[in-house]
Amino acid sequence: MNERISDSIRLIIRRPILRTSIILGIITILVTNHLQITVWKLVDGWSNLLKLGSEALPPDFTVLTERAGWTYPSCTFESDMLCSPAVVGMTQTLEIAFLSTVFGMLISLPLAAMAASNLSPYWLSQSTRQILAALRVLPSLIWALIFVIVVGVGPLAGVLAMTMYTVGYLGKLQYEALEGVSKEPLEVARAMGLPRWQVARFFAIPEASNALISQALFMFEYNVRHGSVIGLVGAGGIGWYMNHYLNPFQLYDKVLALIIVMFVVVVLIDQFSLIVRRGFIDDTANYQKPRWRDVLISKDPALKRVKKAE
């Protein structure tokens, strides 16, 4: 019996995948038990899921054709479709995402230059990074709640909320891109006696322009997806119209139709953005996708060659 246990232990030690799987399994069981997640709760929720499905199917696509007299701001078009909840809500979501991306880009880029260690002194870069990190601590939904309290219900709260989150999120991506530029142009600029802001403006930012534009496009996609959520707390967008049908009417078929409309629009935006971003990606580099085995076990071919050489 003891020999079997010893053999099993040695087998686990020799096989990293098996060892990792066992460790992850134990952690998963402990966390599941701590959160009191049981199969019986899922079974109890099955009846609620069936009820939700029966009330949501088929989706009611009259949200695309019926006129909503309760839109905010009010719709003045004569066409009922243009004033429908789906069109107005999705249009507001796109507008909120666009404005927050533009405003966030204008604010985050100077902060990113201040946070880049190769463009700013240590004390300035570290303090600016802490500011950007503080902006990322609160999710966009919490920012929306704050601005709904400050400026009231409507798209303005959504624009302000998504702008704050965009500054924190996009600023981190930007200063990492600025820190990845070539050192030679920056050293030449400093040797010419240029101040730090000119080094960033005329050398670092143009050098990283492809990455910065690609990040801005990605942020717009992100804001479209998450901008729909902030409407649930009154910050405009299609989420506000979903909340109108959910509370107190519980019209799940109309909500499902709005979700389908949002899904189609987001997919189209993702595809369009992907096509645009390809113009800013260097396709000359040949990147090899890592395998899960290599990621978990950290088997680097270069390290193997070094060990063989030793």
Image (cartoon, rainbow, N blue to C red):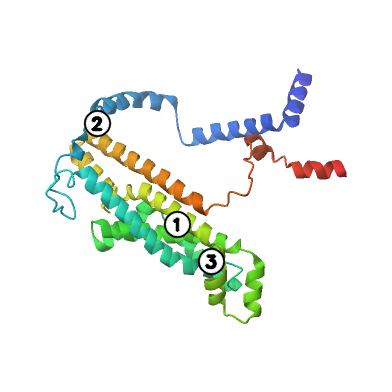
* The label number, if any, that marks residue 206 in the structure image: 3
Q: Give the spatial CA distance, label 2 vs label 3.
A: 48 Å
Q: Nearer the viewer, residue 1 or 222?
A: 222
Q: Is residue 193 left or right of residue 45?
A: right
Secondary structure of residue under mark 1: helix
Question: From mark 1 to mark 2, how far is it between C-alphas?
Answer: 34 Å
Q: Nearer the viewer, mark 3 or mark 1?
A: 3
For the point 66% across and 79% down, the residue is 191
* Residue farthest along the right direction in this orientation: 310
Q: Earlier in the sequence, mark 3 or mark 1?
A: 3
Nearest the viewer among 167 and 180 is: 180
Q: Depth check: give the residue in front, 285 or 113.
A: 285
Amino acid marked by disc 3: Pro
Q: Which mark is residue 59?
A: 2
Mark 2 and mark 3 lie on one chain; the one further toward the N terminus is: 2
- Image label count: 3
Marks 1, 2: nearer the viewer: 1
Quadrant containing the C terminus is top right
**Secondary structure beneath label 3:** helix
Give the class, few, some or many, for how many residues have Cα within 10 Å of label 1's Cα (few <14, many ≥20): many
Determine the residue positioned at 63% across, 31% down: 21
The residue lying at 15 percent from left, 40 percent from top is 66
Say which mark, if any, is on residue 216. Answer: 1
